Image: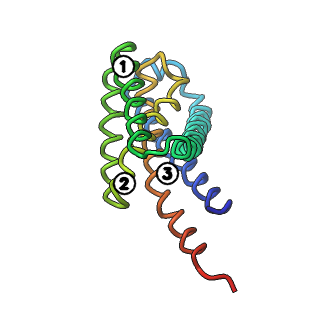
Amino acid sequence: MTLQKWLRLYGFTLSLGIAIIFVTGLIRYLFDPGFVAQFQVDQFGYFLIFLVLFGSIYGTFSHIMFFCFLVLNLLGRGVIQYRFLWQGLQVIIVVSFIVIDLAYLEQMYLPALILIVSGLMVAYFKSKMTNFSAFVPTFFFMNIGSFLALVPVWENETEMLFILPAVLVCNAWQIVQLHQITNKTESLSKTPQT
């Protein structure tokens, strides 16, 4: 992976986060009277700037979580020699954070359900595009990466549901693009040097 490809991935992830927060923010502005009360009509320009900045923050959070996932996955596979043990540990972490903490202790059932279902869907499509060994790491990243990116809005389920689409789409985009970016790099590195 070159720096140019990494920056291109970040730029598109950032744009995706801004676009989705912009759309969900406008929808929320139109249909949530409590949210509208925070902004007056003459401050609509400020509200649009707020959405762009908010989207860029969560696009960046998503990209940071992606980088952390890549490092953690590399270290985990290096430390734990057996793949099934590392993947089993990832499943245990997902269950403990999403099911036990988010659903049971915090009683935020809808965000937990959305995280699990979207994680399963993206992991299924990613494993169809590559191979089945990508299922558990993709499921892990989609759940734990999204879970950690949502920590700033942890106490408010409405805010969490407002941010969740942007984080999920950014995470799904990055994990799906990963094999395409690294495949090109691997094929270039296998060519003989003259």
- Residue bearing mark 2: 126
**Would you say 55 lies left or right of 146 here?**
right
Q: Where, quadrant-wise, is the C terminus in this rendering?
A: bottom right
Q: Position of residue 125 (x, y in %)?
A: 32, 54
**Would you say 114 lies left or right of 185 here?**
left
What's under tag 3, amino acid-wise?
Gln
- Residue bearing mark 3: 174
Q: Residue at x 53, y 63 (%)?
A: 181
- Residue bearing mark 1: 100
As helix, strand or loop, the secondary structure at mark 2 comes to helix
Q: Nearer the viewer, residue 135 or 51?
A: 135
As helix, strand or loop, the secondary structure at mark 3 comes to helix
Q: Residue at x 34, y 55 (%)?
A: 127
Q: Residue at x 45, y 29 (%)?
A: 29
Q: Nearer the viewer, residue 190 or 54?
A: 190
As helix, strand or loop, the secondary structure at mark 1 comes to helix
Residue 121 drawn above or below residue 155: below
Q: Position of residue 150 (x, y in %)?
A: 50, 28
Distance in Å between CA atoms under marks 2 and 1? 26 Å
What's under tag 1, amino acid-wise?
Ile
